Amino acid sequence: MHARPPHLARTSRSVRTPLRRAAVVTGTATGALLLTAGTASAHVTVDPGEAGRGEYTKLTFRVPNESGTASTVRVRVNFPAATPLPSVRVKPHPGWTAKVTESKLPRPVDVGDVRLDRAVTAVTWTAAEGSAIGPGEFDEFDVSVGPLPAKASMSSMSFPTVQTYDDQKVTRWDQPQAPGAAEPEHPAPTLTLVAGPGGHHGTEAAADPTAKPTAASADSTARTLGTAGLVVGILGLAAAGYAALAVRRLGRGGPR
């Protein structure tokens, strides 16, 4: 084998240096962005984020496991007693048992043509052995509810949630979101109420408990990860351009 000429060896080492730097910058930025995205979206949430007043809809409670060592074994979703829902039906969830808690209301509440003195105030899901939500995982729990409150003055419903781990740690997702304020550390899953089809607020908009919601907010996790991916792509292009420029300069004998 012939030894590589000294000037070519220097050029090769010089080319690898900017390429390494570009890779380090891109890799560091990618890790930081993905870590930030994961942290920002690790809340118990309800999907859809909004639904029409007076309608029936399916609510999906998305539960991420935030612990690096323990698994989630119980999820309790509390329903507001001040604005009770006449119908709450739980979708069977393999590996989990659901307990529906019905309580006597402090005072009777009129919902459309129905007067309620009892209503569902909580649903608790408990994992069977081998079905817990492990570190780095999430799960989703579905209920069909309705009709939603029809009053135009009511803009949202909150569902405070209690998440229990197998190491006995308990996380309470019950903090309200104040308008214009920063998101709290443990926000309660919140459903925004909007006008039903055609702007109606009454219960005539839907009668099927399995009906799809009229509007749904885009998933916050998808938006966060999408933004992170876009930024990482831009950083990658910038790093590649920097490396290509360095190679061209070195090919012309290096900077003068």
Image (tube, grey):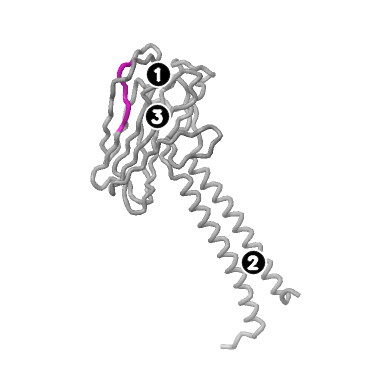
Query: CB of mark 1 within 8 Å of CB of mark 3?
Result: no
Residue 96 image point, x, y percent:
27, 39
Q: Secondary structure at mark 3?
A: strand
Badge 2 crowding class, 10 Å Cα cut-off, few under 14, some 14 to 19, many 20 or more, is many
Asked if residue 228 is among those painted magenta in the image, a careful observer would answer no
Asked if residue 117 is among those painted magenta in the image, a careful observer would answer yes
Left or right? Give the position of 71 relative to 202: left
**Predominant SS along the magenta part:** strand
**Residue topped by disc 1:** 207
Looking at the image, is mark 1 or mark 3 earlier in the sequence? 3
Front residue of 169 and 236:
169
Give the residue type that dot 2 points to.
Ala
Alpha carbon of mark 2 to alpha carbon of mark 3: how far? 51 Å
Q: Which residues are magenta?
A: 116-123
Residue 190 image point, x, y percent:
45, 32
Instruction: Residue at the far bottom: name it.
Output: 2
Q: Residue at x 36, y 53 (%)?
A: 68
Looking at the image, is mark 1 or mark 2 earlier in the sequence? 1
**Quarter of the figure with the C terminus:** bottom right
Q: Residue at x 48, y 46 (%)?
A: 40
Query: CB of mark 1 within 8 Å of CB of mark 2?
Result: no
Q: Is residue 29 above or below residue 145?
A: below
Within the image, what quadrant is residue 102 found in?
Answer: top left
Alpha carbon of mark 1 to alpha carbon of mark 3: how far? 13 Å
Looking at the image, is mark 2 or mark 3 earlier in the sequence? 3
**Residue topped by disc 3:** 58
**Quarter of the figure with the N terminus:** bottom right
